[in-house]
Amino acid sequence: KQEVTQIPAALSVPEGENLVLNCSFTDSAIYNLQWFRQDPGKGLTSLLLIQSSQREQTSGRLNASLDKSSGRSTLYIAASQPGDSATYLCAVNYGGSQGNLIFGKGTKLSVKP
Amino acid sequence: EPEVTQTPSHQVTQMGQEVILRCVPISNHLYFYWYRQILGQKVEFLVSFYNNEISEKSEIFDDQFSVERPDGSNFTLKIRSTKLEDSAMYFCASSESGGLRLVVSDTQYFGPGTRLTVL
């Protein structure tokens, strides 16, 4: 069964710290992987999509890496800010351009001022 | 910036009633999806839709569910006879796909969700 796991479930850091969120998947034959941010009671905001052929993707203070062979992706957040506080979801697509996403349960990040 | 919109934001219904959740995908997108998230649980895939037909559906998407694109802009999810366990946040998503820049065209963009409460 294809599963996505995110550890830790929750993380609290002081403002300004660099941090890494982890995502692991059981089947390495992925098509792409997408990172989202979810604020309480809100929808999902797409942060980064990384294709299976890529090793990393960057957007501003965010950097996502992908290691297919080990079934892992990380989301690196530099110089964290209180506004980064949210739940971060990792989702894997095995089905191609139109494939559905399989989600992890997320990591709830709290950045303290 | 274009975005996916959903209405209503919150729907309360009695068990056994029919509900229709509405979505307006991003205008040049070709692929449409419904997902749901039961409180405290993972986001789960329900169905994908392309070229006016279902591309893929999960085991959750049984005969009580249906989807439709009634016109050029709306995409709807109908639940014929709601159950208590249908209470969840329902998200619509769309993607462009088929573009040359896969990182852009394959990205799924989500709406804000409809919170469905079945009493």
Image (cartoon, rainbow, N blue to C red):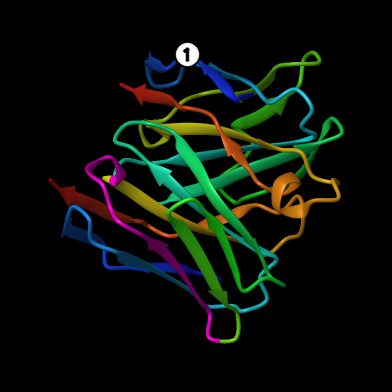
Q: Residue at x 70, y 17 (%)?
A: B74
Give x and y (percent) for residue B114.
Answer: 45, 24
Q: In terms of depth relative to the viewer, which is nearer, B48 or B19?
A: B48
| Residue B34 appearing in the image | yes
Residue drawn at x 79%, y 13% as measured from the top left: B71
Q: Amino acid under label 1?
A: Pro
* Up-down relation of residue A92 to residue B66 (above or below): below
Residue identified by numbered label 1: B8
Which of the pair A35/B55 is nearer the observer?
A: A35
Q: Is residue B5 above or below residue B49?
A: above
* Image quadrant where residue A74 sits: bottom left
Does residue A47 appear to the left or right of B54 in the view shown? left
Q: Is residue A113 above or below residue A90?
A: above
Quadrant (top left, top right, bottom left, bottom right) of the N terminus of chain A: bottom right
Specify whether residue B41 is in view: no
* Quadrant assignment, res B83: top left
* Residue B26 lies in the magenta stretch: no
Please, which chain is the residue tagged with disc 1 on? B
Name the residue: 76% across, 59% down. A96
- Placement of the C terminus of chain A among the 4 image quadrants: top left
Q: Is residue A33 left or right of residue B82?
A: right
Helix, strand or loop for disc 1: loop
Expressed as whole percent of the image width and height from the top left, the position of residue B31 reads 76, 38
User: In the displayed structure, does residue B64 sit left or right of residue A31?
Assistant: left
Q: Nearer the viewer, residue A55 or B43?
A: A55
| Start-end of magenta stretch | A70-84
Residue at 21%, 60% in the rendered image: A11
